[in-house]
Image (cartoon, rainbow, N blue to C red):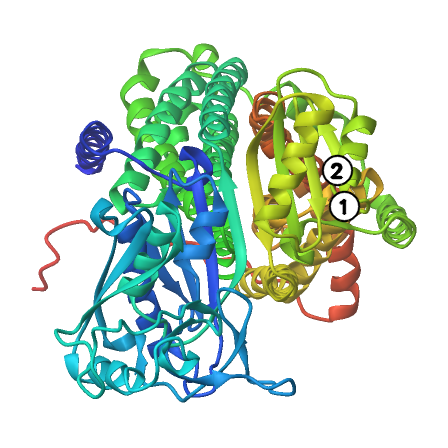
Amino acid sequence: MSRAPLWRAVAALAVIATSLLLALTMAPRLGLDLRGGTQLVFETKDSPTVRADADATDRALDVLRRRADALGVVDPTLVRSGEKRIIVELPGVLDPREAAEVIGKTAQLNFHPVLGPAGDGDKDAIADESGQKLKLGPVALSGAGVTDAAAGTDPQLGPGWFVTIDFREAGPWRELTGKAACEPIGDPRRRVAIVLDDEIISSPQVNETVTCGAGIPGGTTQITGSFSAEEAQNLAVLVKGGSLPVPLELVEQRTVGPTLGADAIAASAKAGVAGVILTAVFIGLVYRLVGLLAAVALACYGLISYAGLVAMGATLTLPGLAGFVLAIGMAVDANVLVFERAREEYGAAPRRGLKAALDRGFKKAWSAVADSNITTLLAAGLLFWLASGPVKGFGVTLAIGVLASLISAMLITRVLAAALIGRFGPGVSGLGSIGRVRTWLTRRNPDLMRAGRRWLAVAAGLLVLVGAGLVTRGLNYGVEFTGGRIVEFGTSRPVDVAAARQAVSDAGFPTAVVQRSDDAISVRTGQITADDVVRVEEALDRRVGEVTKQRDELVGPSLGAELRRNALIALGVALAAQLAYLAFRFRWTFGAAAVAALFVDAAVVLGAFAWLGKPIDGVFLAAMLTIIGYSVNDKVVLFDRVRELWPVSRGTPFRRVVNTAILQTVPRTVNTGLGALFILAALAVFGGDSLRDFAIALLIGIVAGTLSSSFVAGPAAIELERRAGQPPPAPAAPRRRPVARDGSGAVV
């Protein structure tokens, strides 16, 4: 007797127990879009003396980390991305002005001697605090010579704040102040200019008690001026953090309020619960006992994928939550494939019993399950490597979900079904018949591929309609792809969008795009500053009532162009990767037909968003790559069945073979599509505005993908095979059974 069922049961129990332990003992790491805060992305630039390479970026990262610590931010995250980018996450910091100005300020701090008042034509002159132009000498001391700085106040010295600076070496500062002390009191040359980023922040005169040539001893000094407490503290942070080796440019900024993040978590939880319940009810009604066991396995899938996320330390973002919920549909897909196969096996040989049919169903479905999940993992990998921001989290979550769905369907469902399937009759088990739809199709046997060229003509017509939408309506690129700023304000009551537009126009931004959705107002503009955002918020407060900033995203034009280029590369590589994999696993004609159908699927979604005016952003990119990964599953199942039928039907025209394969796989295609539609409908209803467009894109894509498997991929494969000239694959050689021998086998 085989010990495989026992080992499978032990493995399933171990996986569930480990996942439960991880889920109870580890907390998930939430992204800023779920817990609130500010994310800043800086890009290092070349300076006249230093090249912005990986080494300079690492040194800049150390400076930023010291500044974040000095600001008192709890649990800041700073990492280098690529060679020149630095990602800074500041939980709880909702005012991006302070963060960007203090964290990312270039802070080229230098101390100069003052040579005297500047002439009228002196282009190198710099104005002091009072506006007087001064001519400065060369740098006598740089910010690298500073060891510490602190803001302070002393009532005995008078009102106001000052900054105390400690130098690494006392000599340079003593020499600088000693030379200045040789000038008469009141002469501009007795001053020392402290310059921060080509701006004089203080130019104090050397005290009259300092004698000529002696200078200020001790390596410590105080910068005094008209500082407020906040200004003194910020200056101390900059000086103490040190000078950045290279300038920084802010290329992206995202700010999310904690309320919006909490609402997103609650909405995604509702969508997940509703999706699981609807999917469990559906699969239970269709497949009865084995369907209910699959629903139990789906609950285990949720536990396993959650445990995988927390164990990896992955950051859970809002798109990541969508991926978590969507992967439930992937788990259903593998179960449906197995159950449909088991139904076929039982119908072909009912004498062998339900258990044998189920075992053969798992074995024969494995090829299609593996191929479809590998293609989805390809799409998830592309999302991780080519996307940016929260969409990376979607790729990670989707990949973990796919692996968890394999364990759920191929291990846990199998263990549960093997333990119970023999105790019930064929009718209760859900495997006793091939189903009403399959029975009806078998009886009618419609020849869908007789009109194959007509279906291809319909697909071509859809592409023309897509082209018309792209030409006449164009694509509504989000700020991620165009650069600019989008700010979302929550409102306490319904607001007239015309009044909101007028308020934004009065604030000085007449070309801004102002839209209303539910209880929020979104304002999309070009490259405006954080101070400009405050002006817009104040104008809306006065005109439409109290508003609260919920989300603030800024993307620089260079980054927008890069993201747009990466999106096209990601889609192109996704299609090429699917073609290469399918050509390797099947035939090049099958791969080309599948990719042609995938191109139609992607074009239909793109055209629908063009006609509807929906935004094309990073979340849309995640949806498109998911559609490609999800839709290719149908094509894999179809061509897997064609590959199985064709060698044993050598006298049958290829068109009839494809038609038979389509009719045999329709129940799986429809049932899997319905399982995914339940999940997406729940996301569209409960997911809020941020996930609604994502769900709409996937709804359109999955419907298009389900239809294109039969009416585009099938006819395209037939046309390509007519021109390929390749012979059909040879039937697999039958496995030889060992022949029992009579006698002992000894030779006398």
The 10 Å Cα crowd at callout 1, few under 14, some 14 to 19, many 20 or more, is some
Give the residue drawn at x 48%, y 81%.
46
Q: Amino acid at mark 2?
A: Val
Give the residue drawn at x 34%, y 56%.
78
Q: Secondary structure at mark 2?
A: helix
Where residue 285 appears, as percent x and y from the top left, is 53, 13
Query: Viewer-proximal residue, 59 or 277?
Result: 59
Where residue 529 appears, as percent x and y from the top left, is 61, 52
Give the residue drawn at x 35%, y 46%.
229
Q: Amino acid at mark 1?
A: Phe
Q: Which residue is mark 2?
A: 504
Where residue 682 appears, as percent x and y from the top left, is 58, 22
Query: Viewer-proximal residue, 620 or 575?
Result: 620
Q: Which residue is mark 1?
A: 509
Classify residue 221 as left or right of residue 667: left
Query: Viewer-proximal residue, 639 or 375?
Result: 375
Residue 635: tell me if it is visible.
no
Tag 2–tag 1 contact (CB < 8 Å): yes
